[in-house]
Image (cartoon, helix red, strand yellow):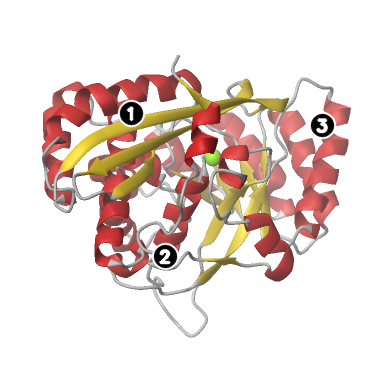
Amino acid sequence: MKITSVQSHVLAYDLPEELGYSQQYYARRTAHLVEVQTDEGITGWGECFGPGNIALANKGIVEKVIQPMILGDDPLDRDVIWHKVYNLMRDHGQKGMSMQALSGVDIALWDIAGKVAGLPIHKLIGGAHRTEVAAYGYAMMLKRESLADHLARFTDEAAAIKDAGFAATKMKVGLGPKEDVQLAEAVRKGIGDDFPFMVDANHCYTTSDAFYVGRAVEDLNPYWFEEPVAPEDLDGYRELRAGLKINISGGEAEFGRWGWRQILENRGLDIAQPEVCGLGGISEYLRVLALCHAHFTPVINHVWGSAVSVAANLHLLAAMPAMPGGLFPWQPMLEFDTTDNRFRDDLLTTPLDIQGQVKATGRVQVPTGPGLGVDPDRAFIERFEVTG
Ligand SMILES: [Mg+2]
């Protein structure tokens, strides 16, 4: 079998309302799908992390840099291909956009391998440790509105996510340390005392501000405090983890086994959040997962993007061994963005219907079809595809 083309499809639409997190506001939803075709008619789908113009630049890397390296290669040689591409791009970026681009290609090769074998990706990895997972819903984004409006909305949105059947909820912060503590109080008010919530700072704090917010919200008992400081700030992570009672999480902006080795050896994470569509695809995710477990660091995948990303993550959550194991082991959850996302909800010929599953059972089933087990709708892709 030979690879005959490697194409990107960047999809975009205007959101019904502007959303924000601690770094920026955004008004368009983007997804970057990768399609790998073969001479035997089998097509694989993958996805690259990275919105907006990042996606368009990554499309250039996928089609103009990676495609010529691997045309004619056997798509089943995905580990050989991974290392060939990585080694040839190493001098130009061991992290960042080159790895995001490689991620989408690698996931598509796993989809092809599953389709050839007639097996879902979690079976290729080694089987399902669980066939369904709980999901946590996040919303509570920042908007160009007053603090009072934020507080009222955060209370309402948190309550709505709890009512929708999710197992936990996650909020954004980033208005400022004092305001952010009030936001966390508003979320706790919306969900009551026993429902888990998490705080995601998207690395907007200095270490001292992160200590202030972390200590102020400790009594609200958040499950984790995500990306409190910049991903490069290894000292800050280590000091925060040692000094706060809350779990420190992060890693969505880390790439590859070498970057992950460094942040794990730094001992700054209670919970690791690898992003499979960014860190190097499924091949590299499995190596990073092994590294995390070698450091006895539990993993809850970072999930963002279209239904292709959600499906890939469901297979990975299924194939994740319990660590350390037991009758009632610690379990991962599926991250689920509850804000408007047509590329997740409407992309597939048979939708995953995560919201419907969560509402009915509080759980999400792992796909069982060959490969990713999902089928993107080409007419839908054509309708939303952008080229620049
Ligand atoms: Mg995050």
Residue bearing mark 1: 96
Instruction: Give, as a three-letter code, the residue at label 1.
Output: Gly
Q: Are marks 1 and 2 in contact (CB under 8 Å)?
A: no
Classify residue 294 by image quadrant: bottom left
Taking 122 as reference, is 88 above or below it?
above
Q: Name the disc covering residue 150, or none.
A: 3
Instruction: Give, as a three-letter code, the residue at label 2.
Output: Gly
Residue bearing mark 2: 369
Q: Nearer the viewer, residue 342 or 131?
A: 342
Describe residue 368's horizontal placement relative to residue 41 as left or right. right
Instruction: Give, as a three-letter code, the residue at label 3.
Output: His
Q: Is residue 293 visible?
A: yes
Q: Residue at x 34, y 62 (%)?
A: 121
Q: Residue at x 55, y 33 (%)?
A: 202
In this rendering, which labeled residue sits more in front, label 1 or label 2?
A: 2
Q: Name the disc covering residue 43, or none.
A: none
Question: Upstream in the sequence, badge 1 or badge 3?
Answer: 1
Residue 316 at x, y percent in the picture:
40, 60
C-alpha span from label 1 to label 2:
31 Å
Q: Residue at x 35, y 25 (%)?
A: 58
Question: Upstream in the sequence, badge 1 or badge 2?
Answer: 1
Looking at this rendering, what residue extends furthest in the bottom direction? 327
Residue 220 at x, y percent in the picture:
74, 52
In this rendering, which labeled residue sits more in front, label 3 or label 2?
A: 2
Q: Secondary structure at mark 1?
A: loop
Q: Residue at x 55, y 60 (%)?
A: 333
Describe residue 284's horizontal placement relative to residue 299 as left or right. left
Question: Upstream in the sequence, badge 3 or badge 2?
Answer: 3
Q: Nearer the viewer, residue 323 or 306?
A: 306
Classify residue 182 by image quadrant: top right
Tell me if mark 3 has few (under 14), some (14-19) or many (20+) residues whose alpha carbon lies within 10 angstroms of its own: many
